[in-house]
Image (cartoon, grey):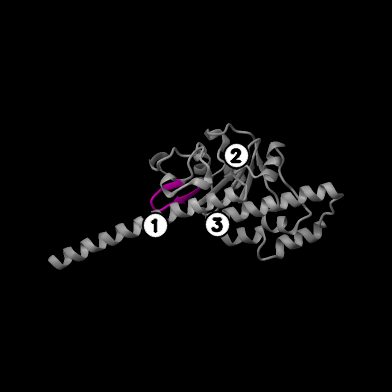
Amino acid sequence: TLFYTKIHNEFFIFLGVALHYTIHQIKKEVVFYAKLLDKKGLVNPLEGNISIYDRDSNKLYITPSGTRKSLLTEKDIAVLQDGEQIEGYLKRSSEYLLHEAALKARPDCNAVVHTHAPYLTAFAYCNKDIKLRCSSTFALLFEDIPCLSYGQPGTKDIANGIEDAIKEHDLILLGNHGCLTVAPTLEKAIAILEAGEEVMKIYTIASSIGTIKNISNDEWEKMCNEHPGSKRNRYKRKE
């Protein structure tokens, strides 16, 4: 009995240590990538938020509201469970409802990045879907980027239409507001954002130089259908 009790107690001590390590690692990751986005100029103190959702514990780890990302610490990260903040020295981001809606719509994803990346957001201000045919990178990663209609920030309305839009898109625009990416990890979600922003930056520069030449429809379809890394083939593997 004493041996059993000892093993039993040590097991739960081990679980406690492992859980603490997991929480620490998640917060550390959120802080790291928030600072990375700040360094790249893709967020500012008043705009942009990122999160990781731990589906096992039903906890959302999200950056706080109105805080300079370069100064964040692990203690600042807000932890939410069932919509209520249960940890964190600072108040949760006002866009947590947007993150929750995106994660609900994409159960294959555990990370959300919402920013006002300039070149992508310029299209959001125009309420325009992005449908380029001049970039092989755009073809393989996105094919198109839909733009949701305007919804009031900080309310559930900002996520209106997100379920359909994000079903087969890892990057979407939010009308008159910004953009949002989802992925299984923060690393991948931010990589998607960076790639999309870079393509739109190049497109804007190219537009100022002269007439942009599109890839032919036949070549476009061939690339999207046959390339193993294309969006079409990535989503086929998920099914």
Q: Residue at x 26, y 63 (%)?
A: 11
Q: Nearer the viewer, residue 218 or 138?
A: 138
Q: Nearer the viewer, residue 139 or 42?
A: 42
Total tally of numbered discs in the picture:
3
Q: Position of residue 57 (x, y in %)?
A: 38, 51
Give the mark toward the camera: 1 or 2: 1
Per the model, the C-alpha gap separating discs 3 and 1 is 17 Å
Is any atom of residue 110 visible in this view? Answer: no
Amino acid residing under circle 3: Glu
Tell whether position 51 is magenta: yes
Q: Residue at x 67, y 52 (%)?
A: 196
Which residue is identified by label 2? Answer: 161
Residue 77: name its quadrant. Answer: top left
Main SS of the magenta part reads strand
Is the Cβ of the residue at disc 3 closer than 8 Å to that at disc 1? no
Tell whether position 167 is magenta: no
The single residue placed furthest to the bottom in the displayed view is: 3
- Over which residues does the magenta segment extend? 50-61
Which residue is identified by label 1? Answer: 22
Amino acid residing under circle 2: Gly
Which residue is identified by label 3? Answer: 187
Secondary structure, mark 1, is helix
Q: Is residue 236 toward the left or the right of residue 73 in the image?
A: right
Secondary structure, mark 2, is loop
**Of callouts 3 and 2, the N-terminal one:** 2
Q: Position of residue 218 (x, y in %)?
A: 81, 59
Give the mark toward the camera: 3 or 2: 3
Amino acid residing under circle 1: Thr
